[in-house]
Amino acid sequence: MTNKQQVDHALSARKNSYSPYSKFRVGACVLCESDNFYIGCNIENATYGATCCAERIAIYSAIAAGEKKFISIAIASDSDDFTLPCGICRQIMSEFSSELEIICANNQGEYKVYSLNELLPHSFKL
Ligand code: THU
């Protein structure tokens, strides 16, 4: 899958976002070494704290399907700016792969690619 195709999957997953509180829709698409891909969208909750980001939903879906090795994750929202992953999601990504590519898109499907090491250097590990 090309980066552009992966961004398109993230943009369409964004349409399933449940975000009545922030009204900030996010979609994500994680590509696995197996060539399978999994999508996620942000799912909010009235407690706010129980909200889950699109990236984590995509990664957790992949893990629930038996995947362990990830190549890249695309993230997109309605914003004109490139959408970067929050700190918690960066830490979740680092749990599973240190080499991950993070494809950060804007609402037009333009994107910038970062390495996880660039976005979360010196990450916590046990
Ligand atoms: N959100 C994500 O889904 N991913 C991020 O990396 C940043 C934030 C969601 C959480 C919440 O539903 C909304 O965006 C506003 O923070």
Image (cartoon, grey):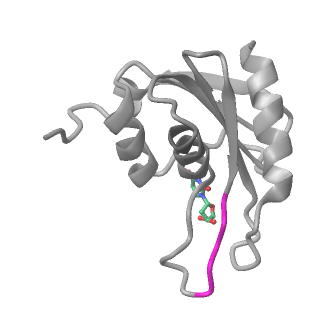
Q: Quadrant of the C terminus?
A: top left
Q: Residue at x 58, y 57 (%)?
A: 53
Q: Is residue 90 left or right of residue 25?
A: left
Q: Residue at x 55, y 80 (%)?
A: 48
**Vertical side of 44 occupied by 4: above or below:** above
Q: Is residue 90 left or right of residue 60?
A: left
Can the viewer see residue 71 in this picture?
A: yes
Outermost residue, bottom direction? 46
Can the viewer see residue 103 in this picture?
A: no
Outermost residue, left direction? 126
Is residue 45 highlighted in magenta?
yes
Picture coordinates of residue 117, whole percent (x, y): 34, 25
What is the magenta range?
A: 42-46
Count the numbered circles shown: 0
The quarter of the picture where residue 102 lies is top right
Picture coordinates of residue 101, whole percent (x, y): 51, 21
Q: Is residue 14 left or right of residue 81?
A: right
Outermost residue, front direction? 66
Q: Residue at x 76, y 70 (%)?
A: 23
Picture coordinates of residue 108, whole percent (x, y): 86, 35
The quarter of the picture where residue 107 lies is top right
For ligand 1, which image quadrant applies? bottom right
Is residue 20 highlighted in magenta?
no
Q: Residue at x 79, y 50 (%)?
A: 14
**Observer-nearest of 16 and 64:** 64
